[in-house]
Image (cartoon, grey):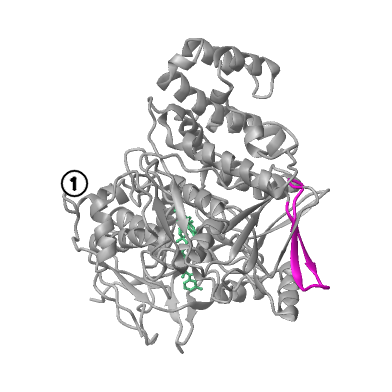
């Protein structure tokens, strides 16, 4: 009797997404692959589980911008996945075992790093953990996933970069690894490559050339944790373009990372004590203000029953209309009304003393009115007496609009006041309506992918409103730094280490002096000359300029399709990899959806929110992973018998439920 052939799967990218997919394969295998052997090759130069972004080897100063209780890798009762729900601890619950707050989770092992262990022992659910603490959690999730695989499913990790995938649509695939002669044979391949580096575009290259000619420092968009900042001299004048999370990371590395410390005064105010090795950081951006602080509390009232205005039925109705759709005109009024619902639901339930109407009465009127109608403005004015309790999304979007300051110092003061008010508000549960709005904002991602997949949005709308405005606005409002980072920013500003430039900054390369000259209409007539320029944001998606060798190979072989949206008036090249939204199959320009290649994550045109799942939020990421895992298991069940998986690949034999660094 012959042994059944083991199917083989190669997963390229073993970060959180690759790990989440593995968990879903484990969960679905008893139903879809109850006994036939399956061997999974995980390919990643970084450790499986954490992967590159969350690897332990990075500065211990860098942190998450999520609270520990808001991060989970496990499905729960809210998850509408087709496969089985398999609950597990959130980061906070997992950390609780080290202080005895929660029971032990198998496989139990204390992290080797004593600093991480000490952090986990004292980690409160509402703390913002270090990236190293999250690294330990992801490492444990990976190990637990391996333990839960049935014995006929085996996993092997290859500490390597994948450089090429070849093979026909209807036959086995070969995956080449850097530094290995023999490719891995695979029945199917998954690309969970996440955040990728890209070579600088033309504008960035010109600035790099300018810097090289004049012996100046220039950093194009890069992953902050990996950037080499050592050439920046103490006291050097540096302009940073971008006021989001990359700015926060870079500032931490250039201040505390260079030996500076904070002292807390008796009134709780922070003072920055410089080491003397810091450069001077001039920061500006389009909005000119930092991303809003994350809230540091929980909802004070019951959660709003979301979605209400931007759910499945509303999107069905939108898609049933004729003609092209425009996000700002057709979708945004419903999306904004949903955010308003989250905001006012929390205000009326948790802080009813600051409202002037019963909730039911307010809601009955709110239901009937359009977001931008004067009647809705009048309803809110009548029902919510304090303007600070009203939600004004347009004012939030343009915080410096129409403001000009006579001197740089006047602007520094204004911005410090703006930031201090934001930090105070976002830490104060009296303003928990902000968290209600945030949760409603998150819920919008439940339906947006469907609208995008419908192909009904105009190219202009996808370019300028989805990829351009929406993701930026979402990050600015909902994905900012923890409050303590903004308090540190205030201290750095008072110490003169950080200087605020303003909104709509312009940076010019001045050949005569070999300096970067920055200006902003926020302080008319004022300029800053700097010898260094940093683009303080991550590289954008670009299939043309990607530094990833595998995607470069697939792209130059014409085996993948860039997501290009085109209509009569506009062509938008997004740089993203086109996939089938339902199950992640990669679109081959010649043959259509590739039955043996699947891609999931930030480099695809699914345009999902790039964030960890929050517990009990029916995370779309779990649904995507589940659908892809089920598609893969079905695809492999349908394969005809053939030769074994590892024959002749020279890399290793299937390992029974264990990872083996091969080579
Ligand atoms: C700097 C940063 C901070 C973030 N902070 C937060 C946060 O605090 N909270 C939150 O909710 N979300 C955060 N995010 C969002 C982020 O999307 C997720 O946390 C998560 O990292 C995404 O996981 P992923 O596996 O899809 O991608 P990644 O984490 O990028 O993992 C992809 C993996 O693929 C590997 N890979 C790529 N190409 C190849 C190849 N050719 N061969 C082999 N391996 C390859 C990489 O080495 C990497 O390990 C952050 C993102 C970044 C970039």
- How many C-alpha atoms fall within 10 Å of the one at disc 1: few (<14), some, or many (≥20)? few
Give above or below for 134 relative to 10.
above
State the image coordinates of residue 624 (x, y, percent, origin top left).
Answer: 46, 51
Q: Nearer the viewer, residue 378 or 238?
A: 238
Position of 548 with respect to 394 (left or right) is: left
The residue beneath circle 1 is 101
Q: Nearer the viewer, residue 523 or 358?
A: 523
Magenta part of the chain = 505-523
Position of 559 with respect to 322 (left or right) is: left
Give above or below for 323 relative to 255.
above
**Which residue ends up furthest to the bottom in the rendered image?**
181
Q: Is residue 511 magenta?
A: yes
Classify mark 1 as within 8 Å of ligand 1 or not, answering yes or no: no
Can residue 255 be seen in the rendering of this structure? yes
Q: Is residue 509 magenta?
A: yes
State the image coordinates of residue 98 (x, y, percent, origin top left).
Answer: 19, 55
Position of 485 with respect to 73 (left or right) is: right
Q: Which image quarter holds the N terminus?
A: bottom left
State the image coordinates of residue 277 (x, y, percent, origin top left).
Answer: 51, 70
Can residue 316 be seen in the rendering of this structure? no
Which residue is drawn at the image coordinates 64% and 17% (left, top)? 376
- Residue 573's image quarter? bottom right
Which residue is drawn at the image coordinates 47% and 14% (left, top)? 359
Q: Nearer the viewer, residue 314 or 169?
A: 314
Which residue is drawn at the image coordinates 27% and 75% (left, top)? 655
- Residue 506's image quarter? bottom right
Element assignment for label 1: loop
Q: Which image quarter holds the C terminus?
A: bottom left
Give above or below for 379 relative to 439.
above
């Amino acid at each position: 009797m012959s042994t059944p052939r083991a199917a083989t799967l190669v997963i390229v990218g073993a970060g959180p997404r690759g790990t989440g997919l593995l968990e879903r394969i484990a969960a679905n295998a008893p139903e879809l692959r109850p006994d036939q052997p399956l061997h999974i090759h995980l390919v990643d130069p970084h450790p499986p589980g954490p992967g590159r972004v969350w690897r332990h080897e990075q500065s211990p100063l860098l942190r998450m911008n999520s609270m520990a209780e808001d991060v989970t890798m496990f499905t729960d009762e809210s998850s509408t996945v087709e496969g089985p729900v398999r609950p597990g601890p959130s980061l906070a619950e997992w950390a609780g075992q080290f202080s005895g707050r929660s029971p032990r989770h198998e496989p139990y092992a204390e992290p080797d790093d004593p600093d991480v262990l000490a952090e986990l022992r004292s980690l409160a659910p509402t703390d913002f953990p270090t990236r190293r603490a999250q690294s330990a959690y992801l490492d444990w999730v990976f190990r637990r996933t391996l333990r839960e695989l049935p014995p006929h499913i085996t996993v092997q990790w290859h500490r390597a970069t994948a450089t090429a995938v070849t093979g026909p649509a209807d036959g086995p695939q070969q995956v080449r690894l850097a530094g290995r002669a023999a490719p891995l044979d695979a029945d199917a391949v998954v690309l969970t490559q996440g955040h990728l580096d890209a070579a600088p575009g033309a504008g960035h290259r010109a600035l790099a050339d300018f810097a090289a000619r004049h012996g100046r420092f220039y950093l194009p968009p890069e992953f902050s944790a990996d950037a080499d900042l050592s050439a920046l001299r103490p006291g050097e004048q540096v302009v940073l373009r971008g006021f989001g999370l990359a700015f926060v990371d870079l500032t931490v590395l250039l201040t505390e990372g260079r030996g500076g410390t904070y002292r807390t005064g008796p009134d709780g105010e922070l003072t920055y004590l410089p080491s003397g090795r810091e450069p001077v950081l001039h920061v500006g951006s389009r909005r000119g203000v930092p991303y809003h602080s994350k809230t540091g509390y929980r909802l004070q009232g019951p959660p709003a029953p979301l979605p209400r205005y931007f759910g499945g039925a509303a999107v069905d109705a939108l898609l049933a209309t004729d003609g092209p759709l425009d996000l700002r005109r057709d979708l945004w009024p419903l999306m904004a009304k949903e955010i308003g619902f989250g905001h006012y639901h929390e205000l009326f339930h948790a802080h009813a003393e600051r409202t002037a109407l019963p909730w039911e009465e307010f809601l009955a009127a709110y239901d009937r009115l359009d977001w931008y109608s004067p009647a809705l403005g009048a309803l809110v004015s009548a029902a919510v007496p304090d303007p600070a309790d009203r939600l004004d999304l347009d004012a939030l979007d343009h915080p410096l609009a129409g403001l000009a300051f006579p001197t740089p110092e006047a602007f520094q003061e204004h911005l410090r006041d703006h930031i201090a008010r934001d930090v105070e508000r976002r830490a104060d549960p009296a303003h928990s309506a902000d968290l209600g709005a945030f949760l409603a904002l998150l819920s919008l991602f439940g339906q947006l992918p469907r609208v995008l997949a419908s192909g009904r949005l105009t190219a202009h709308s996808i370019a300028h409103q989805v990829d351009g405005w929406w993701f930026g606005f979402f990050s600015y409002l909902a994905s900012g730094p923890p409050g303590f980072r903004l308090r540190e920013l205030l201290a750095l500003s008072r110490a003169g280490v950080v200087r605020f430039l303003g909104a709509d900054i312009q940076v010019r390369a001045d050949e005569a002096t070999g300096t970067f000259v920055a200006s902003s209409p926020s302080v008319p007539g004022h300029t800053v000359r700097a010898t260094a320029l940093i683009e303080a944001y991550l590289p954008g998606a670009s299939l043309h300029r990607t530094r990833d060798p595998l995607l470069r190979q697939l792209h130059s072989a014409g085996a993948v399709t860039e997501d290009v949206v085109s209509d009569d008036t506009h062509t938008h090249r997004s740089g993203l990899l086109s996939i089938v939204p339902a199950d992640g199959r990669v679109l081959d320009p010649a043959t259509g959806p590739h039955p043996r290649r699947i891609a999931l994550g930030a480099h695809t045109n699914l345009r999902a929110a790039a964030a960890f799942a929050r517990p009990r939020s029916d995370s779309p990421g779990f649904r995507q992973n589940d659908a892809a895992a089920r598609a893969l298991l079905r695809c492999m069940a349908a394969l005809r018998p053939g030769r074994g998986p590892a024959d002749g690949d020279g890399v290793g034999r299937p390992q029974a439920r264990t990872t083996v660094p091969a080579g």
